[in-house]
Image (cartoon, grey):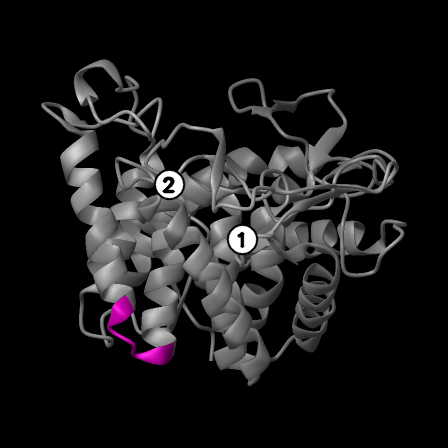
Amino acid sequence: MTIRALGGLLGAYELDHDAALLEKARQVGDSLAYAFDTPTGLPVSHVNVNGKTKTSYNRVCIVEAGTLQLEFKKLSQLTGDPKYAEYAERASEAVENGKRERKGLYPAYINTDTGLFEMGAEYSVGAGSDSFYEYQLKQHILHNGKEPKFKERYIVSSEEVKEVLVRKSESGFTYLGMLYPITSEFREAMEHLACFYPGLLALGAQVLDRPQDLALAKELAHTCYSSYTMMPTGLGPEVFDMSGATGIGIVNAKYILRPETIETLFILYRVTGDSKYQDWGWNIFTAIEKHTKVKAGYAGVADVTVTNSTINHIDAMESFFLAETLKYLYLLFSPTNVISLDEYVLNTEAHPFRIIK
């Protein structure tokens, strides 16, 4: 509800200035406010908006606690009511103050009552963690550099991600794996969700003048794109194996219309001006058109190695396909002044928020 409904309403208001959109955003924000009524200020995962109560479940992933700051802070800015930003800030600080082994890497789960991390949870930039790291940099961007602590946190995190999670496969691909701290087991696999991270590195390279991050972003983007081109359908799998000597294998063969690789191509094109990222995006788009388009919309596929779409479709179209996948493709081929990254920061669901200057 935060990144999709609240973010969507706020992004639409930023472009349209229809007062009804902002009022509806305020209503959504108020409905979600009950989630923050915890001893730590960390939000619970679910609220009952009719009964105005929260769940008693006290385990929340860092994505849920750390991917609401852009939305609630933007809501405060636009409405003039500081309470929404205060909810978001308290949640940010509770995650930051949680005791952990590494300053820049955060276990995926934290307790909303105690503020303690689950120390056995994996380190990754995939499911459960991904957009938490994204919002470290994007809070810095939203506030036009006026809150330097978010810049500092992003830099510390990105350096630890490079040190701990970035590896090169035997076949020469640079990728982002997962580390299980209790056993020190490193999983030689990359989630499609993690393919947002090279775009984040590229954005950080531009905003913070970190050219070394741009070089890594290009390597990781090549891996993500290759996960598409090495499959018979031209679509990238949900999780791909990096342990082999011959290229990229499959752990989970689904493609559910995810946007992360295209998001990265869009940002790299905007940052570098290199048209090859448009070419790569066009190839992915044609694969989507060929293998996922159905009478009523677009459907995910169960197996990216199966080219017979009549037996391969999943009967679902996630909302992020419209909000992100198609929007990033649109922006990839638009003039660079359309939703300029000098004027807007995109939330994790690709809704544009005007930078507060």
* Tag 2: amino acid: Gly
Q: Residue furthest left?
A: 295
What secondary structure do most residues of the magenta stretch adopt? loop
Name the residue located 24 percent from the left edge and 73 percent from the top edge: 275
Check residue 171 in the rendering and tell me which mark sits there, or answer none.
1
Q: Kindly identify the residue that appears in the image at 87 percent across and 36 percent down.
A: 183
Q: Which residue is mark 2?
A: 236
Classed neighbour count for the residue bearing mark 1: other residues with Cα under 10 Å, few (<14), some (14–19), many (≥20): few
Choose between 74 and 265: the one closer to the eye: 265
Asked where in the image residue 341 lies, by quadrant, the reply is: bottom left
Task: Residue 60: give x, y in percent of width and height.
Answer: 70, 33
Mark 2, other Cα within 10 Å: few <14 / some 14–19 / many ≥20:
many
From the viewer's perspective, tell me whether residue 234 is left or right of residue 195: left
Residue 18 visible in this rendered orientation of the protein: no
- Taking depth in this image into account, of 118 and 182 the one nearest to the observer is 182
Identify the residue at horizontal 58%, vertical 71% (top origin).
Answer: 140
Residue 86 in the image: x percent, y percent?
67, 55
Circle 1 or circle 2, nearest the eye: 1
Q: Amino acid at mark 1?
A: Ser
**Residue plotted at (53% across, 78% down):** 205
Say which of 231 and 113 sits in front. 231
Q: Which residues are magenta?
A: 272-276
Does the magenta segment cover residue 150?
no
